[in-house]
Amino acid sequence: MKALVTGATGFVGPRLLRLLDRPTVVSRNPDRARAAIGHLADRIVRWDPMEGPPPPEAFEGVDAVLHLAGESVAEGRWTTAQKARIRDSRVVGTRHLVQGIAQAGAKPAVLVSASAVGYYGDRGDEELSEAASPADDFLARVCVDWEREALAAEKSGVRVVTARTGIVLGAGGGALAKMLTPFKLGGGGPLGNGRQWMPWIHVADLARLYVHAAECQAIRGPMNAVAPNPVRNLEFTKALGRALRRPAFIPAPYFGLRLLFGEFAQVLFASQRVIPRVAVETGFVFQYPELAAALHEILAAAA
């Protein structure tokens, strides 16, 4: 499989590139991308997602497009300008990518486009498969529009998979990097009462799942990119505390995090019991299905 990858310099990108055979990368800054991941890519082509479609040569010989690009939702407060960047980087960027696919001489067979479990909103204890309905908050509306733009590639005869991704755990970045310092200092603890469900996935499994989705003809439409065993926030907190051999009992109140993060605090407290039904039913085997083993591997790699 010859793949084109967007967002290749992010947290997940380099792990994905290592699983691919001489992939093509598109990047706003080819020089920076070359310095960071040039040894993992066959070609690096300049593309600014906000300016228009990728150049036609980016799609030459490409069988699959793996689309990871998007502004982080966890960086800074959700000001009006930041929310616009979050939305446009996903919705407009994906629209331009799909326009490029439509204009390509030889079209790829499949587009696997990132989405997020934010699609489901705050759902308490409800078990959420890919068939669950969307919520109606900011992040959910972004995900709905984001997926709609990706699915437009079906008009060009391209199979489309939208990977609704949970909290990505791995060494050297991602959500865990933000948590480690307070936990190592003994100041970690649950968010509120800790009863909210956390859909998580090890970064190695997420990279493998993108490849699985690209290669498995039976997968079409939404695919929950989460581990098969979601945990409550309190359970996650205890597991991380045990792994670090640190106490983890100081609760973080919603009011304090709302002052610190603004509207993004709602995402931190949302409960999403997301199940990867499509992945499991199509034969994907998770390397890290349980949280304790995932945290053990990540912390050992980071040591």
Image (cartoon, rainbow, N blue to C red):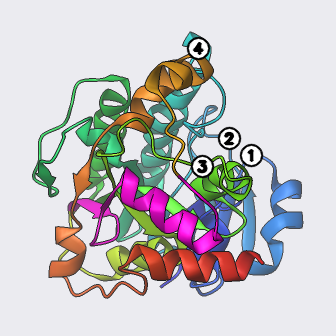
Residue wearing tag 2 = 48
Q: CA separation, marks 1 and 2?
A: 5 Å
Residue positioned 31% across, 32% down in the render:
140
**What is the x, y in percent for residue 169?**
54, 64
Q: CA separation, marks 4 and 2?
A: 23 Å
Q: Which amino acid is tagged 2?
A: Asp
- Between label 3 and label 2, give the one nearer the viewer: 3
Tell me the element at label 3. Answer: loop
Residue 79 disc label:
4
Q: Is residue 108 above or below residue 122?
A: below
Residue wearing tag 3 = 188
Asked if the residues shown at circle 1 and circle 2 are in contact, with their CB atoms under 8 angstroms apart, the answer is yes
Q: CA separation, marks 3 and 4?
A: 27 Å
Q: CA separation, marks 3 and 2?
A: 39 Å
Q: Residues within 10 Å of mark 4 (few under 14, many from 20)?
A: few
Q: Residues within 10 Å of mark 3 (few under 14, many from 20)?
A: many
- Give 111 or 288, whichever is nearer the viewer: 288
Magenta residues, start to end: 221-248
